[in-house]
Image: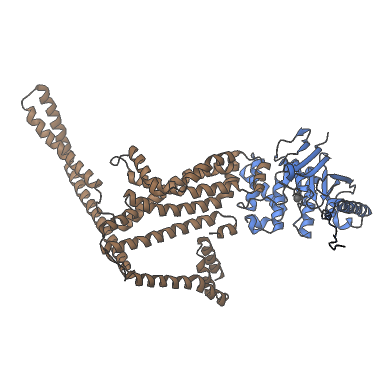
Amino acid sequence: MKEIKYFLLKLIDVTALNFLEPVVRLCYGEEPKVQLEKIGLYILVPMVAFVAFLGLWWGVADNIMTKSGKVPTPPVVWHEASSMWSQHLAAREQRADFYKKQEVRVAELEQKLAQLETPQFEQRLEKTKADLEKLEAENSPRAKSKRAVYESMASQVSNLEAQIENAKTAQYAGAPTYIDQIILSLKTVFFGFAIATAIALPIGILCGISRVFMAAMTPLISLFKPVSPIVWLPICGIIVGAYINADNSSLPPAFISSAITVALCSLWPTLVNTALGVASIDKDHINVARVLRLGFWSRMFKIIIPSSLPLIFTGLRISLGVGWMVLIAAELLATNPGLGKFVWDAFQNGSSQTFAQMFVAVFTVGIIGLLLDRIMVIFQRAVSFDNAQAMAI
Amino acid sequence: MSFFELRHVDKSYGNGKDKTQVLDDVNLKIEENEFVAIVGFSGSGKTTLLSLMAGLIEPTNGAVTMQGKPLKGPGPDRGVIFQSYSLLPWLSVFGNIELAVKQVFPQFSRAERRAHIEKYIDMVHLTDASWKRPRELSGGMRQRVAIARALAMQPEMLLMDEPFGALDALTRGTLQEEVIKIWEEQRRTVLMITNDVDEAVLMADRIIALTPGPEATLGKSFDVHLERPRDPATLNFSDEYKHIRNEISHYLMDLNTESKKLKIPTHDLPLPDIRPKVFATA
Ligand SMILES: Nc1ncnc2c1ncn2[C@@H]1O[C@H](COP(=O)(O)OP(=O)(O)OP(=O)(O)O)[C@@H](O)[C@H]1O
Ligand SMILES: [Mg+2]
């Protein structure tokens, strides 16, 4: 029993879901009064606040009239969300159906091909070919009709092969569902985040270890940090458009320019925190490296980076948050398929149903942002060696 | 030429008005395999002196030489036990020692390295805590890790900055014995900084006092001729032990009072030259 309790508490600590801790402790009858107080504070109060918020929303929404009808109330939004979910499920079923039919068709065609390509057929084909060559060499008038026979036989096979190839590569062409759009958005944000990290980490480390480099970078950082995604996006769009063609690239230009915009806006927190982490490394740790005469790379990977990891992850966490926020705006402007474009299309449509869909998008963005943040907190905790540092949010 | 020498070493921090001279004209000669203890008051510049010898800082004036050659920065030939332990908090006890051992003995095989590290962990009685991180250890345990790390490097010279400061009397005793044992077996040159005269007399061949700062310098030097091995239990009854102990203690006490006398009270502000004036007219 005790072990389960410690396991649960450890799990809660690792996943940073601290509000669950009093629940576990209460289940084990540990100071019930204190735990109840904590549950009240960390679970009950937030729930009451949320319910109050829903009530307020309901009351206000009922009284606002727009071109797209009334502002959707919580039940309307909930209904819309569940219908979007069932649409998604239906679309998935259709897709599964499509691929199942495709499989059947491919199997049929392959069977036909197998039936056709018997040894006898092969022999006949060979023989016809030999005859044809002979006739042609003799310049016989029968060569023409022989050629027609040969070609029709050969084309039977190649036709079937082409059909199989077609059937195999055919893609389901249904419209992307809401969930597909979310996945697309996540792909874009992670691609942008990866670019941001790849740029920010090395530059941040260099800033931290070299005062000259820091002095050189400071004006650039201060200059570009406050620039809004709305400015970066068209610039990126033009530059990316100059190099990448929409038709023959595996990654659409809108995707790339959205990702780069995300990167440009979200690399700053990582850069600044990395530089701070590296620059503020404990002098004692440096002394250890000096006494051991660690080389540059050992010093980098065994002392400098581990000691600044907590701050690096703080930066990464903020960056991912910023990136997610920026992404929606970037997608909206770049019409890159994803949540941003979904909101834009809903706005263009202007019906009361799409109005409710926009509200669903608001909550989706919020919940996914929250989840991304939680994931980063877990990483942050895993790398921090100092508890106090991990607690600071 | 001695094994290790400091000649006319000055050390000051800061510039201009903020300049504080910590060490003034320090001269010290240490012979090979000698065990020297430096006793001094808090804040007098003991750590500064040790950092100079480790090569972590450079003297403002003067020269520091080892085997006749001027020091070129710090190096693993001078193992340092830092006063603040200087453990890497993201590494376990084992990991902290491993980092040093890997660097100093790159020729070790994996198994040899492991055995070597474990030997020193056992020596400081931390076998059960090998996989703990420094933050899960008490102050004394951390200090023991720092000792084990420095010893595992098997340096030519060991520089120890109050290495037993945070330990309880019992652990302190065993570790003092361990360090002496290693020193006797492997014959290393040792410089130990301490504020405990008993500890100095128990362990060292020679004890040198550092005068109180600022502008601290090395004072009188006392040779300890007590026979080794020295047993702390019976030492208390030795006349020579009592004698040298009292001599050093008195010397330090005199230094302290002297330095207090030297301090000129700065709050002795001159009074303004104002005299009562009689306004009444005759
Ligand atoms: N990096 C530094 N910059 C400026 N002043 C310093 C620096 N390091 C030490 N000092 C000063 O030098 C003096 C001696 O410091 P040091 O750490 O050597 O003393 P200590 O004898 O080791 O003290 P303790 O017994 O407390 O360890 C102190 O007055 C301190 O303020
Ligand atoms: Mg000190």
Q: Residue at x 76, y 42 (%)?
A: B12
> Is residue A326 shown left or right of residue A269?
left
What hue represents chain B?
blue
A80 to A233, vertically: above or below: below
B141 to A36, vertically: above or below: above
Q: Position of residue A59 (x, y in %)?
A: 35, 72
Task: Using the image as rendered, state which of residue B94 and residue B140 is in the foreground.
Answer: B140
Q: Quadrant of the N terminus of chain B?
A: top right
Task: Using the image as rendered, state which of residue B232 and residue B255 is in the foreground.
Answer: B255
> Is residue A372 shown left or right of residue B260?
left
Residue A308 visible within the image: yes
Q: Residue at x 34, y 63 (%)?
A: A359
Q: Residue at x 52, y 71 (%)?
A: A24
Q: Quadrant of the C terminus of chain B?
A: bottom right
Chain letter, colour brown: A
Q: How many marks?
A: 0
Q: Position of residue B67 (x, y in %)?
A: 78, 34
Q: Position of residue B123 (x, y in %)?
A: 72, 52
Residue B51 visible within the image: no
* Furthest residue in direction bottom, as rendered: A33
